[in-house]
Image: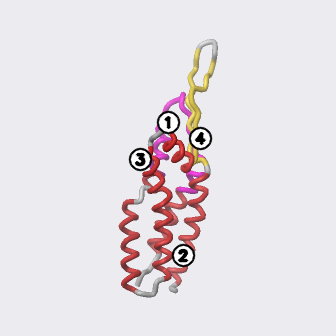
Amino acid sequence: MKTQNKIALLLIVISLICLYPGLVFDILSIEINTELPLLGKINLYQSQQSILETIQSLHRDNNTLVAFLILFFSVMVPILKALILMMVLAVQDFGARQQWFQFVRAIGKWSMADVFVVGVFLAFLATRSNENINAALHPGFYYFLAYCLISLLAIQVMKVE
């Protein structure tokens, strides 16, 4: 195996290691408060969830389509992509390697993991503009971001030739 592909394999493993805490650790907390005369500051809403907890909440609240889309693009596609990339590195037949690698590149275009990260970050920034809304990013966000960047880097490093 070429050195570049050994590096790619290491990056794939590291990306999967980052994916797990990215899915189970809290990613974002939102707190909405108001200031009332005589009563002071009152907490109206508070939420802090991981990606997997968000999927469960959406499913429980009958938002099954949205729950499935997040599950598919944030959990299933990343795992499938990593498994196929490892298979590309293991298969000896050049034609098969090329086809599987092209498949990964095609599903990579449809992978919403990176879009999800940007969406969470934009939600964070949008809520920071209002003094009654407090938002904070949590470790799950950074792990998931690391997964996205490292998995993209693995594809760039990999040589199928």
Q: Mark 1 sits on what residue?
A: 127
Q: Residue at x 53, y 83 (%)?
A: 3
Q: Nearer the viewer, mark 1 or mark 3?
A: 3
Question: Magenta region, mostly helix, strand or loop?
Answer: helix
The outermost residue toward the top is: 38
Rate crowding at label 1 as few (under 14), some (14 to 19) or many (20 or more) other CA atoms within 10 Å: some
Q: Position of residue 33 (x, y in %)?
A: 57, 26
Mark 4 and mark 1 in contact (Cβ < 8 Å)? no
Describe the element under mark 2 as helix, strand or loop: helix
Answer with mark 2 or mark 4, whichever residue precedes in sequence: 2
- Residue labelled with disc 3: 65
Please tell me how crowded label 2 is: few (under 14), some (14-19), or many (20+) other residues with Cα within 10 Å. Answer: many
Q: Which residues are magenta?
A: 117-144
Q: Which residue is mark 4?
A: 48
Q: Is residue 115 left or right of residue 47?
A: left
Q: Say which mark, if any, is on residue 9.
A: 2
Specify the amino acid type for callout 3: Leu
The amino acid type of the residue labelled 2 equals Leu
